[in-house]
Image (tube, rainbow, N blue to C red):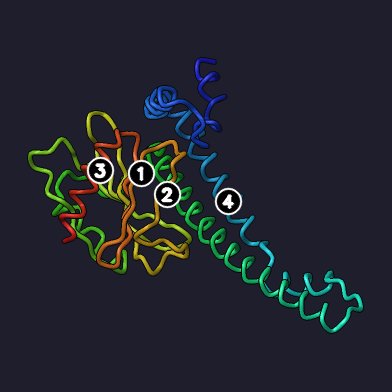
Amino acid sequence: MVCEPWKEKLDTYLDGELSEEEMRSLDAHVHSCASCSADALARVQMKRSIQAAGRRFAPSADFRRRMQQTMAPKPKRSFRLGWILATAAVAILVVGALTTSYVGNRSGRDHVYSEIADLHVATLASSSPVDVISTDRHTVKPWFQGKIPFAFNLPELQNTEFTLVGGRMAYVDQTPGAQLIYNVRKHHISVFVFQEQALRAGLDENSLSPKKAPYNMETWSQGGLRYFVIGDASAADIDSLAKLFRAAAS
């Protein structure tokens, strides 16, 4: 089959492990091939279902504590040795708590970035990428009223190379948000907007986008909202669109 070589690369494509040139080629093919776009969408949905199932069976903090208490050795020791070991144990627990907190926050951030990338790919692979189709921001913005629990501004695109395609609803960890689709020189960019406090991950002003990702991405917090700009466009184009959104939100 003509599509067979492309389908063999879909999993690698969704994991962001192809070269930049291969990513662009496969992006173009997925947009033009109904069979491959449907296959890509199905794989993204399966990937998200597996991630959700894995989180569902994560051990609770209480279970971890009880297991640690069960496995902890209880040898007889002298009073002085006991104090030394107790002090060392406290130090280990403090370091462990700090490490767990850091790893947990990092894992949460990586999960959000993965979800955002999946949503972007799923949108591009969909036969109906937007729910409201319009190049007019005054048409797209009101469409979200009553559908999401916050309001946001869209930038003016006059005298820029960006074109608004439309918008749709988006969800991360069951948190509702807005997804806007823009085009620039045949590249597609998604802009996601969520309430900062509604996201479970510990994202803050110092949160950085993943360095090893299939797409360029920028994220920031402004006015209680968390913005993500992601796409296969150049880093300069991603930054330019992000600046337009920052200015519109000021």
Disc 2 is placed on an element classified as helix
Could you tell me residue 120's position as x and y percent? 39, 43
Q: Quadrant of the C terminus?
A: bottom left
Q: Nearer the viewer, mark 4 or mark 1?
A: 1
> Based on the displayed image, in which of its 4 quarters is residue 145 positioned?
bottom left
Disc 1 is placed on an element classified as strand
Check disc 3 and give the amino acid type: Asp
Q: CA distance from mark 1 to mark 2?
A: 10 Å
Q: CA distance from mark 1 to mark 3?
A: 9 Å
Q: CA distance from mark 2 to mark 3?
A: 17 Å
The residue singled out by tag 4 in the image is 49
Q: Nearer the viewer, mark 1 or mark 2?
A: 1
For this rendering, which residue is in front, 61 or 164? 61
| Rendered residue at 24%/46% (across/down) | 166
For this rendering, which residue is in front, 36 or 175? 175
Whichever of callouts 2 and 3 sits on the residue coming sooner in the sequence is: 2
Could you tell me residue 119's position as x and y percent? 42, 47
Q: Nearer the viewer, mark 4 or mark 2?
A: 2
Judged left or right of residue 218, residue 12 is right
> Based on the displayed image, in which of its 4 quarters is residue 76 positioned?
bottom right
Q: Residues within 10 Å of mark 1 (few under 14, many from 20)?
A: many
Q: Quadrant of the N terminus?
A: top right
Whichever of callouts 4 and 2 sits on the residue coming sooner in the sequence is: 4
Above or below, 42 relative to 18: below
The residue singled out by tag 1 in the image is 217
The residue singled out by tag 2 in the image is 116
